Amino acid sequence: MMMVPPPNGMMARAWQSSRARSISRWMNGERLKVRLAYQRGFQIVDGSTVLAAFENHVEAFKFVRDRGARVWLGWSRTVIGGQSAPYDFSASFLQSSVGRISKNQWGSLSGTWSWSISTSDPRFRLHGGQRGTADTKDEAVFELEREFTRFIAETEKYRR
């Protein structure tokens, strides 16, 4: 849900300050690593502490989601034709590309960041076009990681 700020003045500054605090609380949410555990499925890791282990990645993602956390994805610059694209980053999980964020540089969304889930890896179900817009890069990272966590955790609902 996108909130529209009041038009101007002190009310607008108060609204922006309140929204910034709210976003900060969201983004301070827990980020947990899900990694392969040699011949034993997947581990949930917080720093150097193993919190849990599961036979498959869907169960691991459910554990993370049910804690109110999100999976910490790998991030790198998007490279197109051998060139790093400015303001463009790719998200990965298990060395497979799973999404992307980029800064909108033109039009009515100029200055905001777009995010989208996109994966063709057969280990994951086909994505449903999950995407959105955020005010900052950090918010876009948060949104993509949160939605990818939900996306994988809810895989069972979409199996036929």
Image: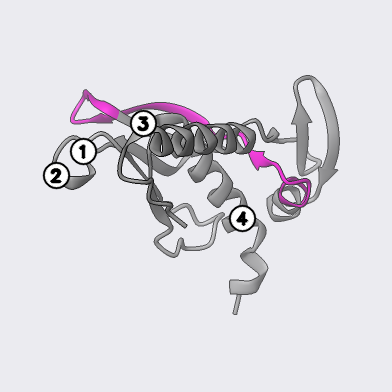
Name the quadrant containing residue 145. Answer: top right
Q: Which residue is mark 3?
A: 89
Kind of element beneath mark 3: strand
Disc with the residue nearer the chain's start (2 vs 3): 3
Q: Which residue is mark 2?
A: 107
Residue 88 on image: x %, y %: 30, 31
Q: Which residue is mark 1?
A: 110
- CA separation in Å, label 4 and label 3: 21 Å
- CA separation in Å, label 4 and label 2: 31 Å
- CA separation in Å, label 2 and label 3: 20 Å
Q: Which residue is mark 4?
A: 150
> Residue 104, can we see it?
yes
**Relative depth, front residue between 35 and 141:** 141
- Colour mapping used in the image: one colour
> As shown in the figure, which amino acid type bears the numbered disc 1?
Ser
**Relative depth, front residue between 86 and 38:** 86
Disc 1: CA contacts within 10 A as few (<14), some (14-19) or many (>=20): few
Disc with the residue nearer the chain's start (4 vs 2): 2
In this picture, residue 31 sits left or right of residue 53 = left
Residue segment shown in magenta? 63-87
Kind of element beneath mark 2: helix
Disc with the residue nearer the chain's start (4 vs 1): 1
CB atoms of marks 3 and 1 within 8 Å: no
